[in-house]
Image (cartoon, grey):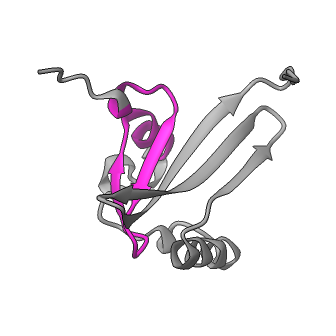
Amino acid sequence: MNTFDWMEAYPHCVTVCDTQGTIIAMNGASRDNFKKYGGGKLIGSSLFDCHPESANEIIRNQLAAQTKNTYITESTDKKRLISQVPWYQDNEFGGLVETIIDMPQEIPIKKR
């Protein structure tokens, strides 16, 4: 049996919440990224305690409608691709998975 844990080995942040917005899983990159907020101790806490109300409204809408949200954040030293998508188990909505990918300042766009 293969015991490879792809999520833990994945080099980008992966954070998973349930249908109520409670954090239920974080990989190593996510725990490290959010260590100043508690890292792995955030598991079991609410996403709504970690975001401003403007973001909480978006999260509530995503949870209610089971929709995705993808965007890029930019600061003076980095760009990040944020992807928040619904996850399902046995065809039942389970919550959201957020992936955060650090991007280079200049990124090529390839048309296919």
Q: Work out which quarter of the rendered image holds the N terminus and state it.
A: top left
Q: Is residue 2 above or below residue 50?
A: above
Q: Is residue 29 above or below residue 75?
A: above
Q: Position of residue 40 (x, y in %)?
A: 32, 48
Q: Is residue 18 above or below residue 61?
A: above
Residue 88 quadrant: bottom left
Question: Which one is nearer the viewer's eye here, 112 or 4?
Answer: 112
Q: Work out which quarter of the rendered image holds the C terminus and state it.
A: top right
Left or right of 108? Residue 12 is left
The number of discs equals 0
Left or right of 95? Residue 111 is right
Residue 75 highlighted magenta (yes or no): no
Residue 65 quadrant: bottom right
* Span highlighted in magenta in the image: 7-34
Residue at the image point whose x is 38% and y is 47% from the top: 39
Q: Position of residue 80 (x, y in %)?
A: 71, 39
Question: Which one is nearer the viewer's eye here, 56 or 41?
Answer: 56
Residue at the image point whose x is 52% and y is 66% from the top: 50
Residue 18 highlighted magenta (yes or no): yes
